[in-house]
Image: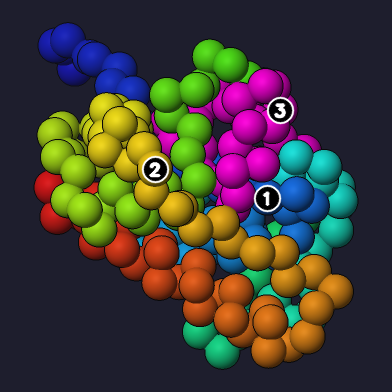
């Protein structure tokens, strides 16, 4: 057998990390929702926490929300957000502005690719110009930030230790925001 062989690296068009506090409620649900909605796009999604409850799984009330939506969250184990996680991510999606600020302090180099879910959704809803497909998402939203100045952006509230109804409401909010974002991301 003769000829030239080439080693081709296969990479995902986009790597997303979702972030909340304990990495047991909001960020794993966001991870699983993004993964489901972007499955055909080859996107990789993971999650982490600013103060992770390392090794803990998703609590029963959030598992019920996921299960009702046909998503199995039982394999999740919480992990801590680190600088190396930030280095590997193309897009860092935080539940709140407080999480975003924390992530940027930990990894300032990731400033232009670290957003809140509400910020991404608002840019998507307003039709931020998206060039370069999925790989251009962080740049598109970063460039669009001036258009969002003064806009009240949604933070995803923490349902931990709250009622099942509150978990349901939080899950519905995340689903709506992520659907807006993924529809925009995949329409480019």
| Above or below, comparing residue 168 to residue 106 in the picture | below
Nearest to N terminus: mark 1 or mark 2: 1
**Quick one: 54 or 103, which is closer to the camera?**
103
Magenta stretch in the rendered image? 80-106
Task: Name which residue lies at 36% across and 55% down.
Answer: 121
Horizontal relation, residue 24 to residue 30: left or right: right
Task: Name which residue lies at 68% across and 79% down.
Answer: 167
| Above or below, comparing residue 52 to residue 118 in the picture | above
Q: Quarter of the image holding residue 157?
A: bottom right
Residue 99 counted in the magenta span: yes
Task: Name which residue lies at 44% across and 53% down.
Answer: 152
Whole-percent x and y of residue 133? 18, 39
Is any atom of residue 64 visible in this view?
Answer: no
What secondary structure is found at the residue carrying circle 3?
loop
**Quick one: 14 or 144, which is closer to the camera?**
144
Distance in Å between CA atoms under marks 1 and 2:
24 Å
Whole-percent x and y of residue 3? 14, 11
* Residue that numbered label 2 is attached to: 150
Nearest to N terminus: mark 2 or mark 3: 3
Horizontal relation, residue 168 to residue 123: left or right: right
Distance in Å between CA atoms under marks 1 and 3:
13 Å
* Residue that numbered label 1 is attached to: 20
Horizontal relation, residue 108 to residue 40: left or right: right
* Residue that numbered label 3 is attached to: 82
The nearer-to-camera label among 1 and 2 is 2
Whole-percent x and y of residue 62? 69, 76
Residue 182 counted in the magenta span: no
Report if the CB atoms under discs 2 and 3 are less than 8 Å apart: no
**Category of crowding for the residue at label 3, using alpha-carbon neighbours closer than 10 angstroms: few (below 14), some (14–19), many (at least 20):** some
What secondary structure is found at the residue carrying circle 1?
strand
């Amino acid at each position: 057998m003769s000829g030239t062989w080439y080693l081709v690296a296969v990479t995902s068009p986009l790597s997303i990390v979702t972030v909340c506090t304990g990495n047991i409620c909001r960020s794993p649900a966001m991870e699983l929702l993004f993964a489901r909605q972007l499955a055909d796009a080859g996107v990789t999604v993971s999650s982490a926490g600013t103060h992770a409850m390392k090794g803990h799984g998703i609590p029963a009330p959030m598992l019920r929300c996921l299960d009702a939506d046909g998503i199995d969250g039982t394999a999740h184990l919480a992990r801590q957000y680190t600088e190396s996680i930030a280095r590997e991510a193309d897009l860092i999606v935080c539940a709140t502005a407080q999480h975003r600020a924390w992530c940027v302090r930990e990894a300032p180099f990731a400033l232009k690719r670290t957003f809140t879910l509400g910020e991404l959704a608002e840019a998507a809803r307003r039709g931020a110009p998206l060039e370069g497909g999925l790989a251009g998402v962080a740049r598109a939203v970063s460039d669009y930030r001036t258009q969002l100045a003064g806009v009240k952006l949604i933070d995803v509230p923490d349902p931990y230790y709250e009622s099942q109804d509150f978990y349901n409401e939080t899950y519905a909010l995340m689903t709506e925001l992520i659907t807006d974002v993924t529809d925009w991301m995949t329409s480019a």
